[in-house]
Protein backbone atom coordinates (compact mmCIF):
# COMPACT_ATOMS: atom_id res chain seq x y z
CA UNK A 1 0.00 0.00 0.00
CA UNK A 2 2.84 2.37 0.86
CA UNK A 3 4.51 1.89 -2.52
CA UNK A 4 1.17 2.44 -4.28
CA UNK A 5 0.75 5.79 -2.56
CA UNK A 6 4.31 6.81 -3.37
CA UNK A 7 3.50 6.16 -7.04
CA UNK A 8 0.27 8.16 -6.64
CA UNK A 9 2.25 11.04 -5.19
CA UNK A 10 4.58 11.00 -8.17
CA UNK A 11 1.61 10.90 -10.56
CA UNK A 12 -0.21 13.83 -8.93
CA UNK A 13 2.98 15.85 -8.62
CA UNK A 14 3.64 15.48 -12.36
CA UNK A 15 -0.03 16.22 -13.17
CA UNK A 16 -0.02 19.34 -10.97
CA UNK A 17 3.18 20.76 -12.48
CA UNK A 18 2.00 19.90 -16.00
CA UNK A 19 -1.37 21.55 -15.37
CA UNK A 20 0.12 24.63 -13.72
CA UNK A 21 2.48 25.21 -16.67
CA UNK A 22 -0.13 24.32 -19.29
CA UNK A 23 -2.89 26.54 -17.89
CA UNK A 24 -0.60 29.56 -18.21
CA UNK A 25 -0.91 29.29 -22.01
CA UNK A 26 -4.69 29.85 -21.90
CA UNK A 27 -5.67 33.43 -22.72
CA UNK A 28 -9.11 35.06 -22.50
CA UNK A 29 -11.05 36.00 -25.61
CA UNK A 30 -11.38 39.68 -24.71
CA UNK A 31 -12.46 42.77 -26.63
CA UNK A 32 -10.23 43.34 -29.65
CA UNK A 33 -10.01 45.76 -32.53
CA UNK A 34 -11.48 44.88 -35.90
CA UNK A 35 -9.42 42.35 -37.93
CA UNK A 36 -7.21 43.94 -40.58
CA UNK A 37 -8.50 41.51 -43.18
CA UNK A 38 -12.23 41.17 -43.85
CA UNK A 39 -13.34 37.57 -44.39
CA UNK A 40 -16.81 36.08 -44.74
CA UNK A 41 -17.76 33.70 -41.93
CA UNK A 42 -20.28 30.85 -42.11
CA UNK A 43 -21.76 29.94 -38.72
CA UNK A 44 -23.03 26.35 -38.85
CA UNK A 45 -25.42 25.08 -36.20
CA UNK A 46 -26.52 21.48 -35.70
CA UNK A 47 -29.85 21.45 -33.85
CA UNK A 48 -32.00 18.52 -32.77
CA UNK A 49 -34.95 19.08 -30.43
CA UNK A 50 -33.73 22.51 -29.32
CA UNK A 51 -37.06 24.35 -29.16
CA UNK A 52 -36.21 25.78 -25.72
CA UNK A 53 -32.97 27.43 -26.81
CA UNK A 54 -32.64 27.71 -30.58
CA UNK A 55 -34.33 31.12 -30.83
CA UNK A 56 -31.95 32.68 -28.29
CA UNK A 57 -28.98 31.16 -30.11
CA UNK A 58 -30.07 32.49 -33.51
CA UNK A 59 -30.93 35.96 -32.21
CA UNK A 60 -27.64 36.29 -30.32
CA UNK A 61 -25.83 35.39 -33.54
CA UNK A 62 -27.89 37.68 -35.76
CA UNK A 63 -26.97 40.66 -33.55
CA UNK A 64 -23.22 40.21 -34.12
CA UNK A 65 -21.31 43.35 -35.05
CA UNK A 66 -18.24 44.02 -37.18
CA UNK A 67 -18.21 40.74 -39.14
CA UNK A 68 -19.65 39.68 -42.50
CA UNK A 69 -21.40 36.40 -41.80
CA UNK A 70 -24.17 33.96 -42.63
CA UNK A 71 -25.97 31.57 -40.28
CA UNK A 72 -26.73 28.06 -41.48
CA UNK A 73 -29.01 26.22 -39.07
CA UNK A 74 -29.43 22.51 -39.74
CA UNK A 75 -32.57 21.03 -38.20
CA UNK A 76 -31.56 17.42 -37.64
CA UNK A 77 -34.79 15.38 -37.60
CA UNK A 78 -36.24 17.27 -34.64
CA UNK A 79 -39.41 15.92 -33.05
CA UNK A 80 -40.35 19.20 -31.39
CA UNK A 81 -40.92 22.75 -32.71
CA UNK A 82 -37.28 23.41 -33.64
CA UNK A 83 -37.97 23.30 -37.38
CA UNK A 84 -41.04 25.52 -37.09
CA UNK A 85 -39.15 28.10 -35.02
CA UNK A 86 -36.27 28.14 -37.51
CA UNK A 87 -38.64 28.64 -40.45
CA UNK A 88 -40.24 31.63 -38.70
CA UNK A 89 -36.84 33.14 -37.89
CA UNK A 90 -35.67 32.65 -41.48
CA UNK A 91 -38.48 34.90 -42.72
CA UNK A 92 -37.39 37.61 -40.28
CA UNK A 93 -33.60 37.40 -40.27
CA UNK A 94 -31.69 37.93 -43.51
CA UNK A 95 -28.40 36.14 -42.61
CA UNK A 96 -30.23 32.91 -41.68
CA UNK A 97 -30.45 29.89 -43.97
CA UNK A 98 -32.32 26.80 -42.73
CA UNK A 99 -31.71 23.21 -43.82
CA UNK A 100 -34.05 20.41 -42.75
CA UNK A 101 -32.64 16.88 -42.50
CA UNK A 102 -35.46 14.34 -42.69
CA UNK A 103 -33.40 11.16 -43.01
CA UNK A 104 -30.06 10.10 -41.53
CA UNK A 105 -27.92 8.13 -44.00
CA UNK A 106 -26.38 4.91 -42.71
CA UNK A 107 -22.82 5.25 -41.46
CA UNK A 108 -23.34 8.71 -39.97
CA UNK A 109 -23.90 10.12 -36.50
CA UNK A 110 -26.69 12.72 -36.57
CA UNK A 111 -24.68 15.74 -35.46
CA UNK A 112 -21.72 14.92 -37.70
CA UNK A 113 -24.01 14.59 -40.71
CA UNK A 114 -25.80 17.85 -39.87
CA UNK A 115 -22.53 19.79 -39.64
CA UNK A 116 -21.39 18.25 -42.93
CA UNK A 117 -24.64 19.35 -44.65
CA UNK A 118 -24.20 22.84 -43.21
CA UNK A 119 -20.67 23.03 -44.58
CA UNK A 120 -21.85 21.92 -48.03
CA UNK A 121 -24.27 24.87 -48.10
CA UNK A 122 -21.76 27.42 -46.79
CA UNK A 123 -20.16 30.28 -48.74
CA UNK A 124 -17.71 31.63 -46.15
CA UNK A 125 -13.95 31.55 -46.22
CA UNK A 126 -14.11 30.67 -42.53
CA UNK A 127 -16.41 28.27 -40.69
CA UNK A 128 -17.70 28.33 -37.13
CA UNK A 129 -19.25 25.10 -35.87
CA UNK A 130 -21.51 25.53 -32.86
CA UNK A 131 -24.56 24.07 -31.13
CA UNK A 132 -28.22 25.03 -30.92
CA UNK A 133 -28.08 26.00 -27.25
CA UNK A 134 -25.14 28.44 -27.25
CA UNK A 135 -25.51 32.18 -26.65
CA UNK A 136 -23.06 34.80 -27.92
CA UNK A 137 -22.06 38.27 -26.79
CA UNK A 138 -22.63 40.73 -29.67
CA UNK A 139 -18.86 41.05 -30.21
CA UNK A 140 -18.00 37.35 -29.88
CA UNK A 141 -17.50 36.70 -33.59
CA UNK A 142 -15.52 39.91 -34.11
CA UNK A 143 -13.26 39.16 -31.16
CA UNK A 144 -12.70 35.55 -32.19
CA UNK A 145 -11.85 36.48 -35.79
CA UNK A 146 -9.46 39.16 -34.50
CA UNK A 147 -7.90 36.65 -32.09
CA UNK A 148 -7.42 34.13 -34.91
CA UNK A 149 -5.72 36.80 -37.05
CA UNK A 150 -3.61 38.08 -34.14
CA UNK A 151 -2.38 34.57 -33.31
CA UNK A 152 -1.97 33.65 -37.00
CA UNK A 153 -3.92 30.50 -36.15
CA UNK A 154 -5.73 28.08 -38.43
CA UNK A 155 -8.16 26.90 -35.76
CA UNK A 156 -9.52 28.53 -32.60
CA UNK A 157 -11.65 26.69 -30.07
CA UNK A 158 -13.07 28.36 -26.98
CA UNK A 159 -13.91 27.17 -23.47
CA UNK A 160 -17.27 28.78 -22.75
CA UNK A 161 -19.15 29.75 -19.62
CA UNK A 162 -20.97 26.55 -18.62
CA UNK A 163 -24.28 27.58 -17.08
CA UNK A 164 -25.67 25.26 -14.40
CA UNK A 165 -28.82 25.63 -12.33
CA UNK A 166 -27.95 23.36 -9.40
CA UNK A 167 -25.10 23.12 -6.93
CA UNK A 168 -24.38 19.45 -7.60
CA UNK A 169 -24.40 19.95 -11.35
CA UNK A 170 -21.78 22.69 -10.94
CA UNK A 171 -19.73 20.40 -8.71
CA UNK A 172 -19.90 17.59 -11.27
CA UNK A 173 -19.01 19.88 -14.19
CA UNK A 174 -16.03 21.17 -12.21
CA UNK A 175 -14.94 17.58 -11.59
CA UNK A 176 -15.37 16.72 -15.27
CA UNK A 177 -13.15 19.66 -16.24
CA UNK A 178 -10.56 18.53 -13.69
CA UNK A 179 -10.48 14.96 -15.00
CA UNK A 180 -10.62 16.01 -18.63
CA UNK A 181 -7.78 18.43 -17.98
CA UNK A 182 -5.16 16.01 -16.69
CA UNK A 183 -6.35 13.17 -18.99
CA UNK A 184 -6.60 15.06 -22.32
CA UNK A 185 -4.28 18.02 -21.51
CA UNK A 186 -6.25 20.61 -23.55
CA UNK A 187 -3.47 23.21 -23.34
CA UNK A 188 -1.46 21.14 -25.84
CA UNK A 189 -3.51 23.03 -28.44
CA UNK A 190 -1.29 26.05 -27.75
CA UNK A 191 2.01 24.18 -28.09
CA UNK A 192 3.32 24.96 -31.57
CA UNK A 193 6.36 22.71 -31.14
CA UNK A 194 4.33 19.49 -31.35
CA UNK A 195 1.56 18.06 -33.53
CA UNK A 196 0.39 15.80 -30.69
CA UNK A 197 -2.64 16.45 -28.52
CA UNK A 198 -4.90 19.28 -29.56
CA UNK A 199 -8.37 20.36 -28.52
CA UNK A 200 -11.83 20.91 -29.92
CA UNK A 201 -14.90 22.14 -28.01
CA UNK A 202 -18.25 21.67 -29.73
CA UNK A 203 -19.72 25.00 -28.66
CA UNK A 204 -17.10 26.96 -30.59
CA UNK A 205 -14.85 25.70 -33.40
CA UNK A 206 -13.53 28.41 -35.74
CA UNK A 207 -11.39 27.37 -38.70
CA UNK A 208 -10.76 28.15 -42.34
CA UNK A 209 -12.67 26.25 -44.98
CA UNK A 210 -9.33 25.25 -46.53
CA UNK A 211 -8.18 23.56 -43.32
CA UNK A 212 -11.52 21.78 -42.96
CA UNK A 213 -11.29 20.47 -46.50
CA UNK A 214 -7.68 19.39 -46.00
CA UNK A 215 -8.50 17.17 -43.02
CA UNK A 216 -11.34 15.53 -44.96
CA UNK A 217 -14.33 17.34 -43.37
CA UNK A 218 -16.68 15.42 -41.05
CA UNK A 219 -16.82 12.76 -43.76
CA UNK A 220 -13.44 11.61 -42.39
CA UNK A 221 -15.02 10.70 -39.03
CA UNK A 222 -18.78 10.28 -39.60
CA UNK A 223 -19.40 8.07 -36.56
CA UNK A 224 -17.28 9.75 -33.89
CA UNK A 225 -19.46 10.66 -30.88
CA UNK A 226 -16.56 12.86 -29.74
CA UNK A 227 -16.50 14.67 -33.10
CA UNK A 228 -15.56 18.03 -31.57
CA UNK A 229 -12.45 16.76 -29.78
CA UNK A 230 -11.49 14.59 -32.74
CA UNK A 231 -11.82 17.54 -35.13
CA UNK A 232 -9.40 19.58 -33.03
CA UNK A 233 -6.93 16.73 -32.63
CA UNK A 234 -7.03 15.95 -36.36
CA UNK A 235 -6.30 19.58 -37.22
CA UNK A 236 -3.38 19.54 -34.78
CA UNK A 237 -2.00 16.28 -36.17
CA UNK A 238 -1.99 17.79 -39.68
CA UNK A 239 0.43 20.45 -38.48
CA UNK A 240 -1.93 23.42 -38.43
CA UNK A 241 -1.63 26.14 -35.81
CA UNK A 242 -4.27 25.85 -33.13
CA UNK A 243 -5.36 27.98 -30.20
CA UNK A 244 -7.50 27.25 -27.16
CA UNK A 245 -8.87 30.37 -25.48
CA UNK A 246 -11.35 31.04 -22.68
CA UNK A 247 -14.44 33.06 -23.46
CA UNK A 248 -16.52 33.19 -20.30
CA UNK A 249 -17.71 36.75 -21.00
CA UNK A 250 -18.28 36.08 -24.70
CA UNK A 251 -20.01 32.72 -25.04
CA UNK A 252 -22.22 30.66 -22.75
CA UNK A 253 -24.00 27.32 -22.91
CA UNK A 254 -26.05 25.13 -20.62
CA UNK A 255 -24.03 21.89 -20.63
CA UNK A 256 -26.97 19.88 -19.24
CA UNK A 257 -30.17 20.94 -17.44
CA UNK A 258 -29.51 18.67 -14.44
CA UNK A 259 -27.02 16.22 -12.93
CA UNK A 260 -29.24 13.35 -14.08
CA UNK A 261 -29.08 14.64 -17.66
CA UNK A 262 -25.30 15.01 -17.42
CA UNK A 263 -24.92 11.38 -16.35
CA UNK A 264 -27.17 10.31 -19.22
CA UNK A 265 -25.17 12.49 -21.63
CA UNK A 266 -21.98 10.69 -20.69
CA UNK A 267 -23.49 7.50 -22.13
CA UNK A 268 -22.53 8.83 -25.56
CA UNK A 269 -18.96 9.99 -24.99
CA UNK A 270 -17.51 8.08 -22.03
CA UNK A 271 -17.02 4.73 -23.76
CA UNK A 272 -15.88 6.45 -26.97
CA UNK A 273 -13.18 8.23 -24.95
CA UNK A 274 -12.01 4.80 -23.77
CA UNK A 275 -11.74 3.52 -27.36
CA UNK A 276 -14.75 1.21 -26.86
CA UNK A 277 -12.46 -1.08 -24.86
CA UNK A 278 -13.89 -2.94 -21.85
CA UNK A 279 -10.35 -3.38 -20.54
CA UNK A 280 -9.77 0.38 -20.72
CA UNK A 281 -13.12 0.98 -19.04
CA UNK A 282 -12.23 -1.35 -16.16
CA UNK A 283 -8.83 0.29 -15.86
CA UNK A 284 -10.46 3.76 -15.78
CA UNK A 285 -12.99 2.76 -13.12
CA UNK A 286 -10.42 1.14 -10.83
CA UNK A 287 -7.86 3.86 -11.54
CA UNK A 288 -10.31 6.63 -10.68
CA UNK A 289 -11.19 4.99 -7.38
CA UNK A 290 -7.58 4.34 -6.38
CA UNK A 291 -6.25 7.74 -7.44
CA UNK A 292 -9.11 10.04 -6.43
CA UNK A 293 -11.24 8.36 -3.75
CA UNK A 294 -8.89 6.05 -1.85
CA UNK A 295 -6.48 8.82 -0.70
CA UNK A 296 -9.37 10.56 1.11
CA UNK A 297 -10.39 7.28 2.78
CA UNK A 298 -6.80 6.57 3.88
CA UNK A 299 -6.49 10.13 5.17
CA UNK A 300 -9.32 9.61 7.68
CA UNK A 301 -8.77 5.92 8.53
CA UNK A 302 -4.98 5.53 8.71
CA UNK A 303 -2.10 7.13 10.57
CA UNK A 304 1.65 7.53 10.40
CA UNK A 305 3.61 7.73 7.15
CA UNK A 306 0.79 6.36 4.97
CA UNK A 307 -1.59 9.04 6.25
CA UNK A 308 1.01 11.75 5.62
CA UNK A 309 1.55 10.61 2.03
CA UNK A 310 -2.21 10.40 1.47
CA UNK A 311 -2.54 13.94 2.83
CA UNK A 312 0.05 15.17 0.32
CA UNK A 313 -1.79 13.36 -2.50
CA UNK A 314 -5.04 15.04 -1.46
CA UNK A 315 -3.31 18.42 -1.32
CA UNK A 316 -1.98 18.00 -4.87
CA UNK A 317 -5.37 16.82 -6.16
CA UNK A 318 -7.33 19.62 -4.53
CA UNK A 319 -4.76 22.13 -5.76
CA UNK A 320 -4.98 20.90 -9.36
CA UNK A 321 -8.78 20.78 -9.15
CA UNK A 322 -8.94 24.36 -7.86
CA UNK A 323 -6.48 25.56 -10.52
CA UNK A 324 -8.46 23.89 -13.31
CA UNK A 325 -11.77 25.24 -12.02
CA UNK A 326 -10.38 28.76 -11.79
CA UNK A 327 -8.89 28.73 -15.31
CA UNK A 328 -11.54 26.70 -17.18
CA UNK A 329 -14.80 27.90 -15.61
CA UNK A 330 -16.51 30.61 -13.60
CA UNK A 331 -17.16 28.27 -10.67
CA UNK A 332 -15.76 28.46 -7.16
CA UNK A 333 -12.44 26.65 -6.59
CA UNK A 334 -13.89 25.48 -3.26
CA UNK A 335 -15.83 22.84 -5.20
CA UNK A 336 -12.53 20.96 -5.14
CA UNK A 337 -13.30 19.83 -1.59
CA UNK A 338 -16.14 17.69 -2.98
CA UNK A 339 -13.69 15.73 -5.13
CA UNK A 340 -14.23 12.27 -3.56
CA UNK A 341 -18.00 12.66 -3.94
CA UNK A 342 -17.95 13.88 -7.54
CA UNK A 343 -15.33 11.25 -8.43
CA UNK A 344 -17.69 8.59 -7.08
CA UNK A 345 -20.52 10.00 -9.20
CA UNK A 346 -18.24 9.83 -12.24
CA UNK A 347 -17.38 6.19 -11.48
CA UNK A 348 -21.11 5.43 -11.31
CA UNK A 349 -21.70 7.26 -14.62
CA UNK A 350 -18.88 5.32 -16.31
CA UNK A 351 -20.11 1.95 -15.02
CA UNK A 352 -23.63 2.81 -16.19
CA UNK A 353 -22.44 3.95 -19.63
CA UNK A 354 -20.34 0.82 -20.22
CA UNK A 355 -23.06 -1.51 -18.94
CA UNK A 356 -25.78 0.06 -21.10
CA UNK A 357 -23.51 0.00 -24.16
CA UNK A 358 -22.79 -3.70 -23.55
CA UNK A 359 -26.45 -4.51 -22.87
CA UNK A 360 -27.75 -2.65 -25.94
CA UNK A 361 -24.88 -3.54 -28.23
CA UNK A 362 -24.31 0.14 -28.92
CA UNK A 363 -25.29 3.66 -27.86
CA UNK A 364 -28.70 5.31 -28.00
CA UNK A 365 -28.40 9.05 -28.58
CA UNK A 366 -31.12 11.57 -29.36
CA UNK A 367 -33.50 8.83 -30.49
CA UNK A 368 -31.05 7.05 -32.82
CA UNK A 369 -29.25 3.75 -32.15
CA UNK A 370 -25.62 3.26 -33.22
CA UNK A 371 -24.18 -0.28 -32.93
CA UNK A 372 -20.87 -0.78 -31.14
CA UNK A 373 -19.59 -2.88 -34.05
CA UNK A 374 -20.17 -0.06 -36.52
CA UNK A 375 -18.71 2.57 -34.20
CA UNK A 376 -15.54 0.53 -33.59
CA UNK A 377 -15.21 -0.39 -37.27
CA UNK A 378 -15.43 3.23 -38.42
CA UNK A 379 -13.10 4.41 -35.66
CA UNK A 380 -10.44 1.82 -36.51
CA UNK A 381 -10.81 2.49 -40.24
CA UNK A 382 -10.18 6.22 -39.90
CA UNK A 383 -7.28 5.70 -37.47
CA UNK A 384 -5.47 3.37 -39.85
Image (tube, rainbow, N blue to C red):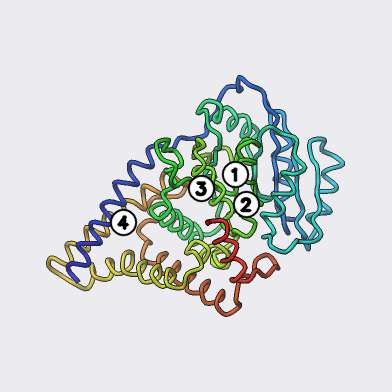
Instruction: Check whether the beta carbons of the residues at disc 2 and disc 3 lie within 8 A of each other.
Output: no
Q: Which mark is residue 220?
A: 2
Q: Which residue is mark 3?
A: 233
* Residue 234 vs residue 27, the one in the foreground: 234
Q: Earlier in the sequence, mark 2 or mark 3?
A: 2
> Where residue 3 sits in the image (x, y, percent)?
18, 67
Label 1 neighbour load within 10 Å: few <14, some 14-19, many 20+: some
Q: Earlier in the sequence, mark 3 or mark 4?
A: 3
What residue is rendered at 78% in x and 63% in y?
79
> Where residue 93 sits in the image (x, y, percent)?
82, 38
Quarter that holds the N terminus: bottom left
Residue 121 seen = yes
Q: As displayed, is residue 336 above or below residue 18? A: below
In this picture, residue 279 sits left or right of residue 233? left
Residue 260 seen = no
Question: What kind of element bears circle 1?
Answer: loop
Q: Which residue is mark 4?
A: 317
> Where residue 98 sits in the image (x, y, percent)?
81, 46
Q: As displayed, is residue 186 above or below residue 140? A: below
Instruction: Check whether the beta carbons of the residues at disc 1 and disc 2 lie within 8 A of each other.
Output: yes
Which residue lies most toward the left here? 304
Question: What kind of element bears circle 4?
Answer: helix
Q: Which residue is mark 1?
A: 215
Question: What kind of element bears circle 3?
Answer: helix
* Residue 178 vs residue 210, the one in the foreground: 210
In this picture, residue 129 sits left or right of residue 327? right
Question: What kind of element bears circle 2?
Answer: helix
In this picture, residue 192 sits left or right of residue 159? left
Label 2 neighbour load within 10 Å: few <14, some 14-19, many 20+: some
Amino acid sequence: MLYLFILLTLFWLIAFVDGWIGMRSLHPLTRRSRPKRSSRLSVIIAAKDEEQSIQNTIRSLSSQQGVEFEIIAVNDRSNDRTGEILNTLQEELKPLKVIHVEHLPSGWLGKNHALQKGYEASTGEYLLFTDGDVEFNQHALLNSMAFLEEQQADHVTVATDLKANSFWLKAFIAYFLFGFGFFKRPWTANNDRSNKGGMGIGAFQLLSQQVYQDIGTHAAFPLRPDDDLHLGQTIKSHGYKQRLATGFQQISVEWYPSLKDAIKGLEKNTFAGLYYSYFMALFAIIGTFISQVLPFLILITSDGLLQAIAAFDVLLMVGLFALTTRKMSTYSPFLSFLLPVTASIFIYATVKAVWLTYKRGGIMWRGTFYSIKELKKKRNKHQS
